[in-house]
Amino acid sequence: EDKVVQSPLSLVVHEGDTVTLNCSYEVTNFRSLLWYKQEKKAPTFLFMLTSSGIEKKSGRLSSILDKKELFSILNITATQTGDSAVYLCAVPDNYGQNFVFGPGTRLSVLP
Amino acid sequence: DGGITQSPKYLFRKEGQNVTLSCEQNLNHDAMYWYRQDPGQGLRLIYYSQIVNDFQKGDIAEGYSVSREKKESFPLTVTSAQKNPTAFYLCASSNRQGANSPLHFGNGTRLTVT
């Protein structure tokens, strides 16, 4: 069964800290891994990763994929209160038709 | 502006009543999806549709129904058969179904059934 696990499930940090969020997956036919940020409503797309070892970066956020060890990390440097959100990780299922989502990591950044 | 519109934002219903959640997109996307989100759990797929007049059950379709009469619209009906309908419902679309097309989400409908 296709599966996505995220850790930690919850994290509280102070502004300026750096955080690393983890996503591990089990899927028979890997195609890609996606990260989303969900504040209060709609998840917004952050990154899509398909190749191992190639870092994707957007401002203070970066992400990398390890297809051998079946995981990805999302790094946020110099965190701000606006980074407080649930971060979701997803992979397409074995048939490539739908997405399997992890439970999310709830990040709280305190001033 | 292109996007996905879900309505209403909040919905309250009595147990035993059917309720329909609206989802409209003007992105010209072929594929549309309905997910349910409960606290501490990931998004779970209810139904999806690749093209007009066609849809498939997701992982938790029991107690729900959908239609796809128009490309832009994919309404979800929560029937009285759904045992635990209180949840946050998210609609999404993508320009083609499959691995290389990220989902675009609506702002969700929070349904409370008492």
Image (tube, rainbow, N blue to C red):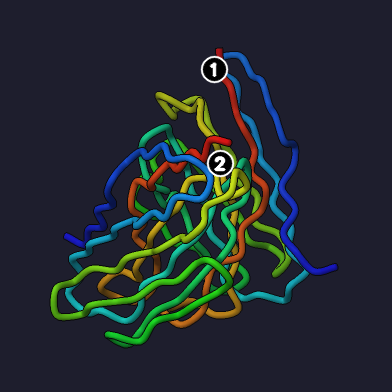
Q: Nearer the viewer, mark 2 or mark 1?
A: 2
Residue B7 in percent (x, y) is at 74, 42
- Tell me if B39 is positioned left or right of B32 in this view: left
Image quadrant assignment for residue A66: bottom left
**Which three-letter amino acid code belongs to the residue tagged 1?**
Gly
Single out the residue that lies furthest toward the front: A16
Look at mark 2 in the image and give the residue it sits on: B89
Chain letter for mark 2: B
Disc count in the image?
2
Answer above or below: position of B44 versus A69: above
Name the residue rendered at 36%, 72% in the picture: A33
Marks 2,1: beta carbons within 8 A: no
In the rendered view of the protein, which quadrant contains the C terminus of chain A? top right
First in sequence, mark 2 or 1: give its number. 1
Measured as percent of width and height from the top left, residue A21 is found at: 34, 56
Q: Residue at x 47, y 61 (%)?
A: A77
Please state which amino acid type lies under the numbered disc 2.
Answer: Tyr
Write down the chain letter for disc 1. Answer: B
- Label 1, on which residue? B16
Q: Is residue B99 above or below residue B46?
A: below
Q: Residues within 10 Å of mark 2 (few under 14, many from 20)?
A: many
